């Protein structure tokens, strides 16, 4: 049986302390038919030199050096260069198990599927915690791909609302092996982060999974997602996050309108808006404004008519008690009480 080529896409920016671990996990894969496309996105540290040293030793490593334009454009540049049958995205501060490519490729050949999804390990400085997306291995036919994958990227519905904090567990492009034709045949590309703030992965996956007819999930954490590097960036207050997320949701809304998606998809997206107060609320709490300045900003968000409509449609019966309290305060626009609750949750989490 012929071995299909896997194109591995890695955007790189100022990550000299981690990039070698990432690359070692790729060049030493048990599956050898790879092209490893590293896009140096204007790094100012020693990242480029490290990439070039690997390229000199391994002809499968391809280095694209460009000015800094962000992760989305870096990935798009890699997609233009990719020639593989399949695509695998890896972030430069993460790594994968050495048998990842061999295992996921064998699944595509056993089942002839469009996408293979797999679990991941959250890597903290002193601990590793596995994360599963589904309970146990799964195979998805076309209808299940629509109901359980595409729709879940839009937002949570039904019993999935028991864990609103996992709303974007399917959104990332890492932890999946895609048929490249899903992207190339549909002329897809990543949206610029400056427009939507975050979750460019989710918007891309929304377009990809609309075209997915079959998929497999492997309940094993092949991917290692580093949580400590860049934590200060991840927890930095983002002034434009609210307006950017409205653009993201509007783009998702346009997609489902253009593709005549059903009412369940519309409900999922409405739930996404309502649940986004988790990220927005914690973002507000990280600002340098005083307590009452934060309350004012949070009240502004909660008074938005789009959020008021979303909370009217949000089913509360699935939530555990602490999330019922959280979203109940948001629904009633009790901004001060919600901010106090966020501060308490942050304190408990950081202990």
Image: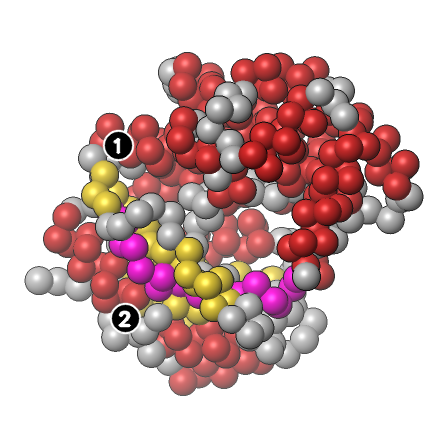
Residue 36 sits inside the magenta stretch: no
Quarter residue 125 falls in = bottom right
Q: Is residue 337 above or below residue 307?
A: below
Residue depicted at x 65% and y 64%: 230
Answer whether residue 229 is visible to the viewer in this image.
yes
Q: Give the class, few, some or many, for how many residues have Cα within 10 Å of label 2's Cα (few <14, many ≥20).
A: some
Quarter residue 294 falls in = top right
Residue at numbered disc 2: 99
Badge 2 or badge 1: first in the primary sequence? 2
Q: Is residue 268 above or below residue 109?
A: above
Residue depicted at x 68% and y 59%: 350
Find residue 344 and report its horizontal and vertical position in percent. Answer: 73, 47
Answer whether residue 32 is visible to the viewer in this image.
no
Quarter residue 264 falls in = top left
Q: Secondary structure at mark 1?
A: helix
Is the magenta region chiefly helix, strand or loop?
A: strand
- Depth check: 115 or 37 in front? 115
What is the spatial separation of the Cα atoms under label 2 and label 1, in whole angstroms?
28 Å
Residue 226 sits inside the magenta stretch: yes
Q: Is residue 266 above or below residue 296?
A: above
Range of magenta residues: 216-231
Q: Residue furthest front?
A: 321
Residue at numbered disc 1: 144
Find residue 229 and report its horizontal and vertical position in percent. Answer: 62, 67
Residue depicted at x 41% and y 61%: 130
Find residue 120 and report its horizontal and vertical position in percent. Answer: 41, 59
């Amino acid at each position: 049986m012929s071995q299909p080529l896997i194109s591995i896409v890695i955007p790189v920016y100022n990550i000299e302390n981690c990039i070698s671990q990432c690359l070692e996990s790729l060049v030493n894969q048990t599956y050898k038919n790879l092209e490893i496309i590293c896009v140096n996105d204007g790094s100012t540290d020693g990242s480029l030199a490290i990439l070039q040293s690997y390229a000199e030793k391994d002809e499968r490593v391809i280095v694209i050096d460009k000015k800094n334009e962000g992760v989305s454009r870096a990935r798009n540049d890699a997609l233009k260069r990719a020639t593989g049958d399949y695509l695998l995205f890896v972030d430069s501060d993460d790594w994968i198990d050495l048998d990842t490519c061999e295992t996921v490729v064998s699944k595509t050949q056993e089942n002839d599927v469009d996408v293979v999804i797999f679990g991941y390990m959250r890597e903290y400085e002193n601990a590793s915690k596995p994360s599963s997306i589904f309970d146990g291995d799964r195979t998805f036919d076309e209808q299940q791909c629509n109901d359980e994958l595409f729709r879940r990227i839009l937002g949570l519905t039904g019993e999935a609302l028991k864990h609103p904090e996992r709303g974007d567990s399917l959104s990332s492009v890492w932890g999946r092996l895609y048929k490249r034709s899903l992207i190339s045949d549909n002329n897809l590309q990543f949206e610029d982060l400056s427009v939507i703030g975050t979750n460019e992965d989710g918007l891309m996956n929304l377009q990809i999974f609309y075209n997915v007819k079959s998929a497999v999930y492997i309940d094993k954490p092949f991917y290692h997602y580093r949580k400590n590097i860049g934590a200060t960036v991840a927890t930095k207050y983002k002034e434009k996050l609210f307006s950017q997320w409205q653009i993201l949701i509007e783009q998702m809304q346009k997609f489902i309108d253009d593709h005549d998606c059903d009412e369940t998809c519309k409900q999922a997206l409405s739930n996404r808006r309502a649940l986004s107060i988790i990220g927005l609320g914690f973002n507000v709490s990280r600002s340098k404004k005083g307590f009452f300045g934060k309350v004012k900003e949070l009240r502004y968000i909660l008074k938005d008519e789009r959020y008021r409509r979303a909370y009217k449609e949000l089913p509360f019966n699935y939530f555990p008690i602490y999330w019922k309290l959280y979203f109940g305060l948001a629904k009633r626009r009790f901004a001060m009480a919600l901010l106090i609750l966020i501060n308490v949750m942050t304190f408990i989490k950081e202990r």
